[in-house]
Amino acid sequence: MVEYDFKPDGTTFKDLSDEDRAYVQENMKATSKKPNKLPRKFYHATYQKNLSSILDEGLKPHEIFGEIYFCEKENQCLQFMDRRLPIIIFSIETSKLDPNEIYLSSDHVKTKNRNFHAYTYYKHISPELCKNWRRTQC
């Protein structure tokens, strides 16, 4: 079984084999639930340093977990960010995404401190869908 933390031998996420990465991604998707309904838009927060690569290459799934994370509201996605750093928020219309690849996040679940759902998307999102963004003041 793959551990989602540093291993005692010093192995990190980036050191996982392709087979281990595939296992983690399949497990993340298999343990996630499908949402009953979708909001009109998703919001994705990232650090400003990532802006130019996203505008050039689009949003890519996480290299280990295979997901792109979203929230229903801008202020929700900020709760996962270090607000001391410059942040960009993208808005993506859910109607332009493959509904078969949208799930409720199994690792960003509703908690006492976060009374909202986060979502995951398991495909690359083209740069054309990443044109709506703004810098935020935190």
Image (spheres, rainbow, N blue to C red):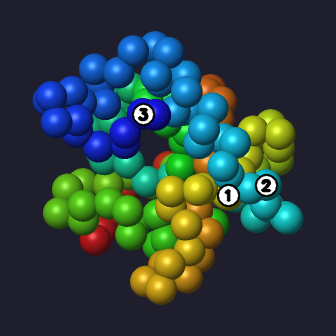
Left or right position of 24 against 88? right
Residue at 36%, 29% in the rendered image: 52
Residue type indicated by callout 3: Val
**Dot 2 or dot 3, earlier in sequence:** 3
Q: Are marks 2 and 1 in contact (CB under 8 Å)?
A: yes
Q: Are marks 3 and 1 in contact (CB under 8 Å)?
A: no
**Dot 2 or dot 1, earlier in sequence:** 2
Q: Which residue is mark 3?
A: 2
Q: Is residue 28 at all visible to an observer of this figure?
A: yes
Give the distance between the C-alpha atoms of the residues marked 2 and 3, in whole angstroms. Answer: 24 Å
User: Residue 98 placed where, x, y %?
Assistant: 80, 37
Frontmost residue, 35 versus 8: 8
Q: Secondary structure at mark 1?
A: strand
Residue at 32%, 55% in the rendered image: 87
Residue type indicated by callout 2: Lys
Residue 34's disc is: 2
Give the distance between the C-alpha atoms of the residues marked 3 and 1, in whole angstroms. Answer: 22 Å
Residue at 61%, 27% in the rendered image: 124
Q: Nearer the viewer, mark 3 or mark 1?
A: 3
Residue 104's disc is: 1
